[in-house]
Amino acid sequence: MSGRARVTLCSAAATLMAACALLPLVDPATWIFQAAFLLAVQCGVGAAARRVPLARPLTVAAQALVTLILLTFVFARQYAVGGLIPGPETFRHFGDLFRAGADDVTRYAIPAPLTPGIRLMVIGGVLLIGLAVDTLAVTYRNAAPAGLPLLALYSVAAGLSDAAADWLWFLVAAAGYLMLLLAEGRERLSQWGRVFGGAPRSPGEQIGPVAPVRTGRRIGMAALGVALVVPLLPLPAIQGGLLDGTGAGVGAGSGGGGTISAVNPLVSLRDSLNMDEDRTVLTLRTNTGSLSDLYLRIVSLDDFDGTTWKPSKRHIVAVPDEFPTPSGLSGDVKRSEITTRIAASDGYAQDWLPMPYPPSSVRIDGNWRYEPVGMTLVGDHGQKTNGKTYEVKSLDVQPTREQLADAGEVPGAIRNTYTEVPDSLPPVVARQARDITRGAGSDYEKAVKLQDYFAVTGGFEYDTEVEVGSGRDAIARFLRDKQGFCVHYSFAMAAMARTLGIPSRVAVGFAPGSPQADGSVAVSLKDAHAWPELYFEGVGWTRFEPTPTRGSTPSYTLPDTSGDTVPEVPEASRSADAAPSAAPSASTSCAAADKKEAEACAAALPVDAVSQGGGGTPWYALAGWSLLGAGALALPVLPMLWRLRRRSVRLASAQHTGSAPGSAPPGRRRGEEAGPDDLRAEGAAGSVRLDVPAKEAGEAAVAHVLAVWRELTDTAWDYGIEPDEALTPRRAAERIVRLGELDASVGRSVHRVAGAVEQVLFAPEPRAEAGLADEVRTVRAALRVRVSRTTRIRAVVAPRSAMRAVWDLSDRWTALKASWAARLRTPAWADRLTGLVRRPGRQNG
């Protein structure tokens, strides 16, 4: 194996070894085999392009193009022309898959399932890193900087994983990088000749690795050992600066500052909902008189980008002893304080702390931080809820319908923040919101009409078979199909409220659980729920329940006995005040009885993978892409067709080398000048130009013999004997006979053609010999017998000598530039274009 091939193999292996750090993140890990195969194809294309040889930018471009085709075939062949050629629909599908993958990453905990979106992100990322490593280490012969993309790949995996065996993946990735460095160093040394490795240290001992390689291994193993051992030593900590307070949590240390990023709060919730069986996650005891309003709120989602809702980036502080009064709540609203003691099961690991809203104080052990805007608690530096028991004092706010209807003007800061709607929201959402609330005299009446529309009058159905996804048309599609889960209803109502100028957000948590015989309340996975919260000045953030037959309808949205015009809303299908039972009852809150419904309860709005548009694809677009696809499919066979045509022309012209002086070869009129392909005297590679004798007969003889000589050298090139432009025809013939291991009779055929070349080039009166075409056919048959089957196939399908077509184009471009040099200034990019393809230099052998 050559040094360059060894470095190519090590670059692919190093990328794959670094990618092993991603294995704990996704289950199952079968993606690694597909990534390995695609990575091998990518590196193989690079090796072939460098062997041609192509210029470095063209080599990278060829690898990038093949990588795109591979990803198209694996992930989007149904949207591609011929299953391989990507078009606009292909890139749209890639975008949809990437968005779905990003959404899946935020929803699932480790290990995440291998969804199509995650598989694209993982495999595509490995191929992108592999291309960068191969480009740096092999194409540009600089393996040291190739460690940066390898480090990036490992760092992403290590930053997401918290497994105890992370050191093992670091060891694997570091070993791959060291292997790449050693291979590249050995290849550099080999260019200076044979490296002396020293004599055996004792009689009969075999000579081991050469000294530089042996020393490199020692240094590499020592450095790797230091990297693994030093972090385990009790070294003094560095205080202050960028290293202070970093950790696995969201805060900036144990103090009172820091921020919490817009991380999707459905990560742990969605992971818990993926359980096949229902189980109790929270057990609580409370002194409230009614459980119907005892929702356990985890966090609020207030950032709406048109496709989904997520929490904004907020400032977090230390947990205060007493929480401030909720924003917007006045002293006129009736309230009472309740105490709830909650115990989380060992299997429920959540970053956010479930609490009744609004809380007034929390007593809990551990590292927790307080987010004042949403009045939520979040774990700091990896703190989780599993196994925790805590006590929450909260307010049971009991507004009346009159207080909500007479709510004052919303402050400008709240209105601007919580009524913001992106331009991407379909206009049908706002239009339908206005139609539903037509005739309402206040924001409260509009909110009740929206709730009634979803829960009672709109004909919506709680359906467990709705596909889950995200997209700008998701809400419009939900309003059209009228089927979905709790998240669909809450997202849609909150978005509609914002279009009406009512501040809104979405809360995520648990609906009221099931009372038990011992007086406790059991909250299970299937009680997971999402509901909208709307803001009314004087009352604050107020819960609504648009999901039909789920949760409990707030009392302040129900009509009284005096006869209100608001339509009657039925109570939830399961009352939270039902008679106690000895075991947890089956909950009917926003989670279904099966795994799929439980997953969708915490997912985004349903949307198809490809946005639905009308009109279809225009005929001219279909025709254009069809032509492009046909051209792309024909592109791989062009070298073969060009080579067959060129052989036919050359050997056909050679049949006329014994004709009368002055006769022209087939395809050229008498007196017509010979082209560049016929008037170039070739050695084994053939680029020595000579002037042609003035006489017409001599010109024809030179053209004919040089054509057959070029065919002979190109045939040898196709079968693995690379040309050497520095040799004379006689020396080139000897080289072909020697490297091709041709017998004496075939060797005479080679020398006869070479002698004919010398005669027409150097004789006073050039003359052509007959039968040269037959000699070339004899040599070709002999070379074909002595090579492997792979070489024979490549000589036909992808002949090496087809590069002459590119060189001819380069020559014609140079001639064209020269002809226009007096009129136009040649642009700099034209000079770079002509240098993209390098011709082979002198070869040893």
Image: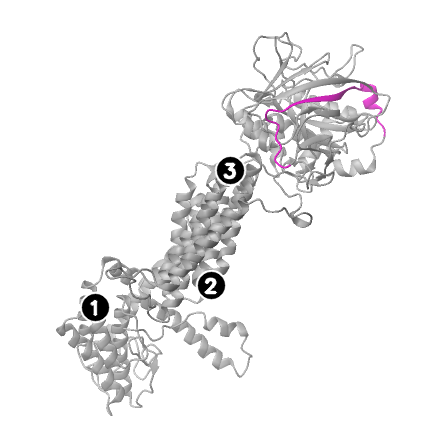
Observer-side mark, 1 or 2, equals 2
Mark number displayed over residue 142: 2
424 left or right, relative to 562: left
Q: CA distance from mark 2 to mark 3?
A: 33 Å
Nearest to N terminus: mark 1 or mark 3 = 3
Q: Residues within 10 Å of mark 3 (few under 14, many from 20)?
A: few
Q: CA distance from mark 1 to mark 3?
A: 61 Å
Pointer 1 with pointer 3, Cβ within 8 A = no
Q: Which residues are magenta?
A: 381-408
Tell me which amino acid carries mark 3.
Answer: Ala
Nearest to N terminus: mark 2 or mark 3 = 2
36 left or right, relative to 644: right
Q: Nearer the viewer, residue 686 or 28?
A: 28
State which quarter of the image contains the C terminus.
Answer: bottom left
For label 3, the SS is loop
Disc 3: which residue: 163
Pointer 1 with pointer 2, Cβ within 8 A = no
Farthest residue, direction front: 202
